[in-house]
Image (cartoon, rainbow, N blue to C red):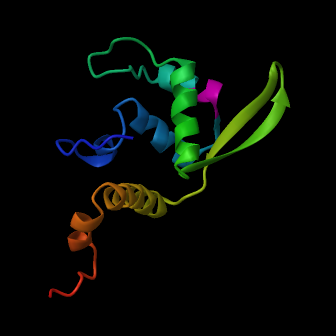
């Protein structure tokens, strides 16, 4: 996840190719193959300059990161070639936004423990 304050919407936190995939995950569950096919069908490229299609590995890495961040969950099913993860969004859009905010606030508190306190609500009492 990144933080680009020059952007608006989910592109503040995610790469441009990742945003449509996040939106799609709010609508349905996806395997990595379905995720890559969705990106391919919608001609979503890895960069705004259109430098090529998103690889299946990139889709897998992104969805696994979202699992690690607590934004997605998955189940496994057996199939041709072994186990396959089926990714699903377990948060509402409001919960998703709250979770992303919490991740950044937690990191800021970790990196700038004293400085970050002045931005928390309720504000600490001034001495």
Quadrant of the snapshot with the C terminus: bottom left
Q: Which residue lies at the image location 60% right of the left edge and 44% below the top edge?
A: 28
Give the answer, above or below, for where 127 lies relative to 33: below
Which of 8 and 103 lies nearest the eye of the viewer?
103
Q: Is residue 32 magenta?
A: yes
Residue 108 sits in quarter: bottom left
Q: Which residue lies at the image location 46% right of the left edge and 43% below the top edge?
A: 23
Quadrant of the snapshot with the N terminus: top left
Q: Position of residue 34 (x, y in %)?
A: 62, 28
- 77 to the left or right of 117: right
Give the answer, above or below, for where 31 lies relative to 100: above
Q: Position of residue 15 (x, y in %)?
A: 35, 33
Q: Position of residue 58 (x, y in %)?
A: 51, 24
Which of 100 and 109 lies nearest the eye of the viewer?
109
Residue 20 sits in quarter: top left
Q: Is residue 47 magenta?
A: no
| Stretch in magenta | 31-35
Residue 97 sits in quarter: bottom left
- 53 to the left or right of 56: left
Point out the residue furthest to the top here. Answer: 52
- 103 to the left or right of 68: left
Q: Position of residue 119 (x, y in %)?
A: 22, 70
Q: Which residue lies at the image location 26% right of the left edge and 71% below the top edge?
A: 117
Give the answer, above or below, for where 74 lies relative to 36: below
**Total residue callouts:** 0
- Magenta-drawn stretch, dominant element (helix, strand or loop): helix
């Amino acid at each position: 996840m990144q933080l680009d304050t020059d952007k608006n919407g989910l592109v503040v936190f995610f790469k441009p190719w990742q945003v449509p995939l996040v939106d799609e995950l709010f609508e349905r569950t996806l395997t990595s193959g379905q995720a890559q096919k969705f990106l391919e069908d919608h001609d979503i490229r890895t960069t705004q300059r259109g430098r090529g299609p998103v690889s299946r590995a990139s889709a897998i890495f992104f969805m696994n990161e979202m699992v690690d961040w607590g934004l997605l969950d998955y189940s496994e099913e057996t199939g041709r070639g072994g186990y396959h993860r089926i990714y699903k969004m377990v948060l509402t859009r409001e919960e998703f936004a709250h979770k992303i905010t919490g991740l950044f606030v937690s990191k800021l508190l970790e990196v700038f423990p004293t400085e970050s306190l002045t931005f928390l609500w309720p504000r600490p009492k001034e001495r």
